[in-house]
Image (cartoon, rainbow, N blue to C red):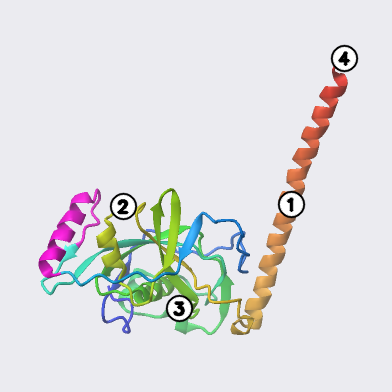
């Protein structure tokens, strides 16, 4: 299924394995101050050298080896022209609210097939948090780029924010650490999946905010900023309640310990 007309070099279909809904969550859209201590998740900035393009025979062997390790029906398929198709899973880890059309239902599979852009049906906008740590499965081609994957995900969730605000990362586990690296928009995720094999513990894809600087508040409208304030006030009240509850439990335990100590003889 083609995501839109601008993605002619590949395709990216989105399986209906996630409930199409938006909701607010306790999080924040501010950049978090990085800890001076060594973090568990390390973002690598060094560009890796690109391997030479494999031949048709090499691709055939790699795909056969890949499919032999698959324990479900998500196989890769080699086409006569040397391209191939397969599946990737993308984890959504967006910590800032996204802008979506107000009062418009999520896009159905029929709208996607007819390439109906529901976001263009209204100029009203509102802001929501997408489900944190949700997973979306995509059926893509070997010619589908990172940029097209991001555009396809945003279209699926009817996000009207600029795609440049988002980035696709690959995560790998090495020596007990989770290493994260931002992918160039011209990278081909399916080829990376083919090289790594089907095990998502070895390689996984994550959609995050494109951390290029501080929040550009001028990019948001007045209603969006007002909605952010409502969200922040709600989060502040929840945080205060959590802290009060924590210290109430601590106070109760301390009082019980003092009572037991006073009741003991001598």
In the image, which is nearer the foreground, mark 2 or mark 1?
2
Q: Secondary structure at mark 3?
A: helix
Residue range of the region highlighted in magenta in the rendering:
55-76
Q: Looking at the figure, which quarter contains the C terminus?
A: top right
Occupied quadrant, residue 60 = bottom left
Residue denoted by label 2: 199
| Direction from residue 26 to residue 172 in the image, left or right | left
Residue denoted by label 4: 265
Of mark 2 and mark 1, the one earlier in the sequence is: 2
Mark 1–mark 3 Cα distance, whole angstroms, equals: 36 Å
In the image, which is nearer the foreground, mark 4 or mark 1?
4
Occupied quadrant, residue 195 = bottom left
Within 10 Å of disc 2 (Cα), the crowding (few <14, some 14-19, many 20+) is few
Which label was assigned to residue 163?
A: 3
Of mark 3 and mark 2, the one earlier in the sequence is: 3
In the image, which is nearer the foreground, mark 3 or mark 4?
4
Q: Position of residue 97 (x, y in %)?
A: 57, 70
| Direction from residue 15 to residue 38 in the image, left or right | right
In the image, which is nearer the foreground, mark 1 or mark 3?
3
Of mark 2 and mark 4, the one earlier in the sequence is: 2
């Amino acid at each position: 299924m083609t995501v839109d007309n601008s993605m002619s070099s590949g395709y990216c279909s989105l399986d209906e394995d996630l409930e199409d809904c938006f909701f607010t969550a306790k999080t924040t859209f501010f950049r978090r101050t990085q800890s001076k201590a060594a973090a568990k998740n390390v973002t690598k900035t060094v560009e890796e050298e690109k391997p030479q393009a494999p031949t048709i025979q090499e691709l055939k062997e790699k795909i056969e080896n890949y499919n032999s390790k698959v324990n479900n029906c998500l196989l890769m398929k080699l086409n006569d022209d040397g391209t191939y198709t397969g599946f990737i899973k993308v984890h959504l880890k967006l910590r800032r609210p996204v802008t979506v059309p107000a009062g418009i239902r999520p896009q159905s599979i029929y709208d996607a097939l007819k390439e109906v852009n529901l976001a263009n049906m209204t100029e009203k906008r509102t802001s929501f948090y997408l489900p944190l740590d949700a997973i979306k499965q995509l059926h893509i081609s070997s010619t589908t780029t990172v940029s097209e994957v991001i555009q396809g995900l945003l279209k699926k969730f009817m996000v009207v924010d600029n795609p440049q605000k988002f980035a696709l990362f690959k995560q790998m586990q090495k020596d007990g650490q989770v290493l994260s690296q931002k992918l160039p928009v011209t990278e081909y995720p399916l080829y990376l999946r083919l090289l790594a094999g089907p095990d998502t513990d070895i390689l996984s894809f994550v959609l995050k905010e494109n951390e290029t600087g501080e929040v550009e508040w001028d990019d948001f409208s007045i209603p969006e900023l007002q909605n952010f304030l409502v969200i922040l006030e709600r989060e502040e009240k929840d945080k205060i309640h959590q802290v009060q509850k924590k210290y109430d439990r601590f106070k109760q335990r301390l009082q019980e310990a003092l009572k037991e100590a006073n009741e003991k003889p001598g």
